[in-house]
């Protein structure tokens, strides 16, 4: 079994009957959804809140019941992937472009579990390019600011065209190697007009499940 599958299937064990579940996005979440689909078929009663069009389509194909985020007051548990995770369970997300909805769903959740393969664990964040979701209007100006800061910005592309998120924004990926103070970087980005959201997810994950050659490891936030 591959590491992503191992982590995804282990996370499904944390799902209980009656839960409102945040459903993350990506190739690791794919495996969790397969497992969840089987349990729903077996009688498990849950409602999912999707974080992307891709997850909505997959959940529907597996007959996983979905509800609208604006019809609920909170989410019991969210299971999502991550692009890299440090020892404090801070991470970078958004490699698939779903960071905005993922962060909204995570912030409404009583518990957040991330599922990753072992290659995603890092000592300090910054190896993975940091996605910044921006308003297309004025995005060139933001691009210049990032350039001046030496962050090697790149507009994310889909083929020849700009990548457009589910909420109609564009993404600028930044290189922030050896990020010394992720909170400082996050606060700086939060303060820039035109930045809709960024992929630094700090103090959000409660549990990390890592697929490893000898089996899944469960890591709790300190
Ligand atoms: O925008 C995408 C999400 O943040 C994903 O959860 C993240 O990119 C990890 O995806 P994967 O499990 O495919 O590596």
Image: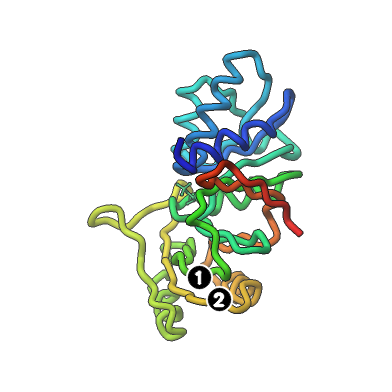
Q: Distance between the residues labelled 1 and 2?
A: 5 Å
**Quick one: label 1 or label 2, which is nearer the N terminus?**
1
Res 126 label: 1
Residue 153 placement (x, y as % from top left) = 39, 73
Which residue shows up at 60% across the image and 63% down it?
A: 86
Q: What element carries label 1?
A: loop
Residue 51 placement (x, y as % from top left) = 55, 42
Which residue shows up at 58% across the image and 48% down it?
A: 210
Q: Which residue occupies the extreme bottom position in the image?
A: 148
Tell me whether the residue at label 1 lies in contact with that at label 2, contact meaning CB atoms closer than 8 angstroms: yes
Which residue shows up at 69% across the image and 34% down it?
A: 14
Q: Which residue occupies the extreme front position in the image?
A: 214
Position of 88 relative to 97 (above/below):
below
Residue 201 placement (x, y as % from top left) = 61, 60
Residue 25 placement (x, y as % from top left) = 50, 43
Q: Left or right of 146: which side holds 195? A: right
Q: Name the residue under label 2.
A: 179
């Amino acid at each position: 079994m591959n590491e992503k599958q191992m982590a995804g299937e282990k996370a499904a064990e944390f799902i209980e009957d009656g839960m409102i579940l945040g459903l993350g996005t990506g190739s690791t979440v794919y495996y969790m959804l397969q497992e969840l689909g089987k349990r729903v078929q077996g009688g498990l009663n849950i409602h999912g809140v999707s974080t992307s069009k891709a997850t909505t389509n997959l959940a529907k194909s597996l007959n996983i019941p979905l509800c609208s985020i604006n019809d609920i007051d909170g989410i019991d548990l969210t299971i999502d992937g991550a692009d890299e995770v440090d020892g404090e369970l801070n991470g970078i997300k958004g490699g698939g472009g779903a960071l905005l909805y993922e962060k909204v769903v995570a912030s409404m959740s009583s518990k957040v579990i991330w599922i990753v393969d072992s290659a995603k664990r890092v000592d300090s964040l910054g190896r993975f390019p940091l996605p910044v979701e921006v308003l297309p209007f004025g995005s060139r100006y933001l691009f210049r600011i990032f350039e001046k800061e030496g962050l090697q910005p790149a507009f994310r592309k889909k083929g020849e065209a700009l990548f457009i998120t589910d909420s109609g924004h564009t993404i600028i990926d930044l290189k922030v190697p050896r990020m010394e103070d992720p909170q400082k970087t996050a606060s700086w980005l939060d303060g820039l007009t035109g930045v809709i959201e960024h992929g630094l997810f700090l103090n959000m994950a409660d549990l990390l499940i890592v697929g490893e050659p000898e089996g899944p490891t469960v890591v709790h936030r300190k």
